[in-house]
Image (cartoon, rainbow, N blue to C red):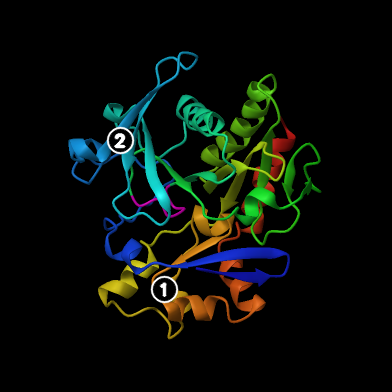
Amino acid sequence: MRFFEAGPMRILVLVLKSRFNNRREPTPFKMVDEPVSEGIFNFTKIKPNETLFHLNFKEIEDCDGKIIANASPFEFCHSLIVPNCDKLYNQVLRKLPLHLALKVMLLSATDYLCLGFNSLLAYASVNHLHFHLWYSTHRLYASVCPTRRKECLPHYMELDFHPVDNFVFEFNSDKDFQTTFERLWKVIERCQELQIAHNLFAARNASGVLRVVLWPRRSAFEPKACLRHLSGEPPESSSTLADFDVAVAELAGMLVVPDASTAQELTSSLDRLLEVYMKEKLEKHLMSKLEKALQLL
């Protein structure tokens, strides 16, 4: 484990070969809302002892959940929240499951609990609705970075510096939870309607307030490049950067890499790391479409 200063960004770098060796092989997807294929792995097929415990909130009707062990963890207590597991939802955010996941975050008083979601085409590897849950050894950049108003959408906030466009929502009190949640949901809905891939991260900010960061991002139609590297399939270029992809943990400020050479190349210079992030930035015409859709609300 080490840190890399990328301009104002302080990035945690984890070399963790086991994460990539033990993962289930990801499936390539074609759409953000692709239906579940019953012949492919889903979380109804796990062993009984992989379920750690069940979730049920009185105030959230018609939505319960399981917390299950992650077969390829990258951090302490890395597990998965699977809402309404037997209903076999595809990996598309829904209101009640997201509400449930954020309530789990609010139950914890620690500043180091993190929640992550990867949509299809944003490096989700399983098409069955789930969230990642883990304890970070250090606070991640996206949780503590200062925020500012978005220039094109002054009613929305964003991280003060991040190479990939984002939206920030902070849940300052129980009283304001629903109002903030509805604003977050409007952005998620617009992303879904426009078939824009997205990643979502939640953690406590520097003041202990629950912060949610949403990144609309470029669609990724290929399986995880690191798995191509470990399987022996040659990368598309001689650079190990071809063997690295950016999902929610990476966007939040934690680079999980399979080997020291990938870590070295990623952190060899600020320009090199920014290049990796910029590859995930949503195309300008799609970002403009999203902004216009939000301006109409």
On screen, 267 above or below 69? below
State the extent of the magenta-drawn residues as a range: 120-125
Residue under label 1, please give it. Answer: 243
* N-terminal-most mark, 2 or 1: 2
Our reading of the magenta stretch's main secondary structure is: loop
Image coordinates of residue 287 in percent, x first then y, are 65, 51
Q: Amino acid at mark 2?
A: Leu
The answer to whether residue 124 is magenta is yes
* Disc 2 from disc 1: Cα separation: 33 Å
Position of 50 compared to 287: left or right?
left
Residue 118 drawn above or below residue 96: below
Q: Nearer the viewer, mark 2 or mark 1?
A: 2
Left or right: where 9 falls relative to 60: right
Residue 259 at x, y percent in the picture: 40, 75
**Dot 2 surroundings within 10 Å: few (below 14), some, or many (20 or more)?**
few
Q: Which residue is mark 2?
A: 52
Q: In the image shown, does 134 or 37 lie closer to the viewer? A: 134
